[in-house]
């Protein structure tokens, strides 16, 4: 500040610095830390944190569904076609998920060939079954002699669990039922596989 003889500030001297480049780099680093390097969707930690935020801060009467999607026979694809081919299948599955779900839903890869999705505003088991059926249909493909499909386990929030741990446990148990029954199956917690 510059002051006159009466002590009043009459001018400010400063330096303006454009930090937009640094801010863009910071945002890029944050994005990289939150996403899965291969698929570009949320990584396991970010996925679980975002779901946890929704559950801990629910909107009144909010309902949802936690879905675990497991790629059937990815090990076979890796063993017969190579890991690059297996990785390409995972990338394709992630892209299909992003196109099938709303931007308000949370879609992430939690490891290996497993994906986790939290759907907001799922009000009934029948609505969840329809959504899961569309996933099974979209994730069943045969391209260039490579056949792949997925199995699904799901749990409704808050009926099947009010914490991410309980929802995950119940959806994982349902996924186990799907895998035990064969490929391309859907199981909802508390119901038999479809």
Image: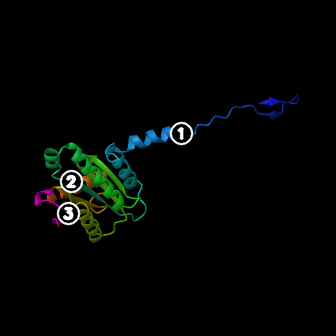
- Residue 112 visible somewhere in the drawing: no
Q: Residue at x 20, y 63 (%)?
A: 186
Residue under label 3: 186
Q: Residue at x 35, y 60 (%)?
A: 99
Kind of element beneath mark 3: strand
Residue 189 located left or right of residue 11: left
Mark 3 surroundings: few (<14), some (14-19) or many (≥20) residues within 10 A: many
Q: Which mark is residue 23?
A: 1
Q: Position of residue 101 (x, y in %)?
A: 35, 61
Callout in the foreground (3, 1) = 1
Q: Which label's residue is closer to the chain start, 3 or 1?
A: 1
- Residue found at the very far bottom of the displayed protein: 126
Q: Cα distance, mark 3 to mark 1?
A: 44 Å
Q: Position of residue 10 (x, y in %)?
A: 82, 34
Residue 90 highlighted magenta (yes or no): no
Q: Residue at x 55, y 38 (%)?
A: 21
Asked if marks 3 and 2 touch (Cβ < 8 Å), the reply is no
Q: Which residues are magenta?
A: 179-193
Q: Which mark is residue 71?
A: 2
Residue 87 located left or right of residue 101: left
Find residue 79 and report its image quarter: top left
Dominant SS type (magenta): loop
Instruction: Work out whether residue 81 or residue 15 is closer to the camera in this orientation and state it.
Output: 81
Q: Which mark is residue 69?
A: none
- Residue found at the very far top of the displayed protein: 5
């Amino acid at each position: 500040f510059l002051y006159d003889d009466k002590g009043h500030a009459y001018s400010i001297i400063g330096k303006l610095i454009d930090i937009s480049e640094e801010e863009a780099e910071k945002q890029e680093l944050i994005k990289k830390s939150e996403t899965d390097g291969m698929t570009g969707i949320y990584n396991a930690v970010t996925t679980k944190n975002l779901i946890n935020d929704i559950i801990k801060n629910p909107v009144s009467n909010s309902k949802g569904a936690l879905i675990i999607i497991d790629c059937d026979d990815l090990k076979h694809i890796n063993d017969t076609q190579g890991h690059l081919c297996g990785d390409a299948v995972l990338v394709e599955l992630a892209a299909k998920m992003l196109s099938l779900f709303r931007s308000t839903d949370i879609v992430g890869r939690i490891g290996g060939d497993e994906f986790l999705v939290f759907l907001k505003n799922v009000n009934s088991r029948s609505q969840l079954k329809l959504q899961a059926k569309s996933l099974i249909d979209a994730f069943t493909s045969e391209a260039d002699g490579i056949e792949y499909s997925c199995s699904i386990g799901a749990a409704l929030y808050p009926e099947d669990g009010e914490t991410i741990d309980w929802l995950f446990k119940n959806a994982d148990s349902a996924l186990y039922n799907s895998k035990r029954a064969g490929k391309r199956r859907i199981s909802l917690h508390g119901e038999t596989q479809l």
